[in-house]
Amino acid sequence: MIDELLFFMEVLVGGLLAGTMYSLVALGFVLIFKASATFNFSQGAMVFFSVLAFCGFMQDFNVPFVLAFILAALLMVVVGLCTERLVLRPLMNASEDTVLMATIGLGYVLEGLAQAAWGVEVRRLDLGIGDFPVPWIADNLKLFISALDITAGLVAAIMIIGLFLLFKYTKIGLGLRAVADDAGAASSIGIPLKHIMLLVWSAAGVVALVAGMMWGARAGVQFALVDLALKALPVLIIGGFSSIPGAIVGGLIIGAVEKVLEYRKVFKNDDEVEKHISFIKKEILISDKENRMLELKNWLKKLD
């Protein structure tokens, strides 16, 4: 009974942490919707484009990790600039439906550019963070929580807190809220609407890059990342299309519910749960022994 309860807690915590990865994707939608009241259908393509560019810089040109991230982030700023100049500015007075269709077209353009520039094969992305249980948590708390999930949760928390503070207590945030309430009135009192839109699309691009890195590290960098936008829809429906805190709450709910339903579907009785727990414990012990043997071999090599 205790083992089953611990396993359920493990599933629930893992679901909450995985939900933060959904929140990262939803954040991009929220940022753009707050500024323009437009649902950005190209957000999934932005995730795919940004992380594929990041992999291309590292793997094709041997660029260091940090520099590759900076280059990919700058590339997304350029994408935001081009979007504002070539897509949004000509459609400034167009209907919401027209802008919505334009974002769909933008998504197709980004998908094509990404594959033309970096290829169509699936790329492996190694962030140096293993998708395996953290030994300390497994030993002390008896919970097998993935290191990648914990890292994604911390990154999402930092980004959400940063964006919340930025839009709540700075002039940029004040301008964004004014534009979201009434773009015409905001422009008439001197708020630079074009700069606000550029900033929002650039920020959404950087958020897409971070989300793509987290998902790419788990499932590989591939075209299927475009479909992440579909997973963000329930998050937005629960948390709201214009709420940054709502994006994280919606992501946590969707992640937890998804994992709990998987748990109930896969393990239909107590015996199956106990067998799975025993198997995981054995795998952890084997992995720990292999790591210790590798450390011992490296130590002996140094002595030689």
Image (spheres, rainbow, N blue to C red):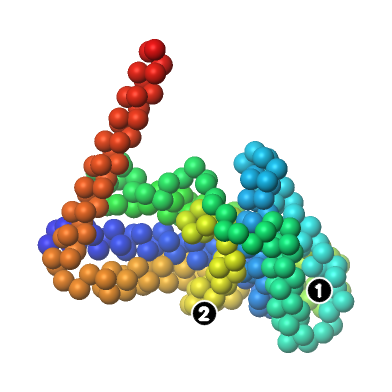
User: Residue 237 has which mark?
Assistant: 2
Of 114 and 169, which appears nearest the observer?
A: 114
The picture quadrant where one finds residue 87 is bottom right
Element at badge 2? helix
Residue 259, percent across and down?
35, 68
Which residue corresponds to mark 1? 88
Of 35 and 218, which appears nearest the observer?
A: 218
254 relative position to 270: left or right: right
151 relative position to 221: left or right: left
The picture quadrant where one finds residue 52 is bottom right
As drawn, 1 above or below 63: below
Element at badge 1? helix
Looking at numbered disc 1 in the image, what kind of residue is underneath it? Leu
As drawn, 170 above or below 224: above
Instruction: Give neighbour class at mark 1: few <14, some 14-19, many 20+ (Cα, 10 Å).
Output: many
- Inspect this view and state whether residue 7 appears: yes
Which residue is located at x 49 percent, y 59 percent? 219
Of 294 and 105, which appears nearest the observer?
A: 294
Of 287 and 164, which appears nearest the observer?
A: 287
Looking at numbered disc 2 in the image, what kind of residue is underneath it? Ile
Residue 27, percent across and down?
58, 65
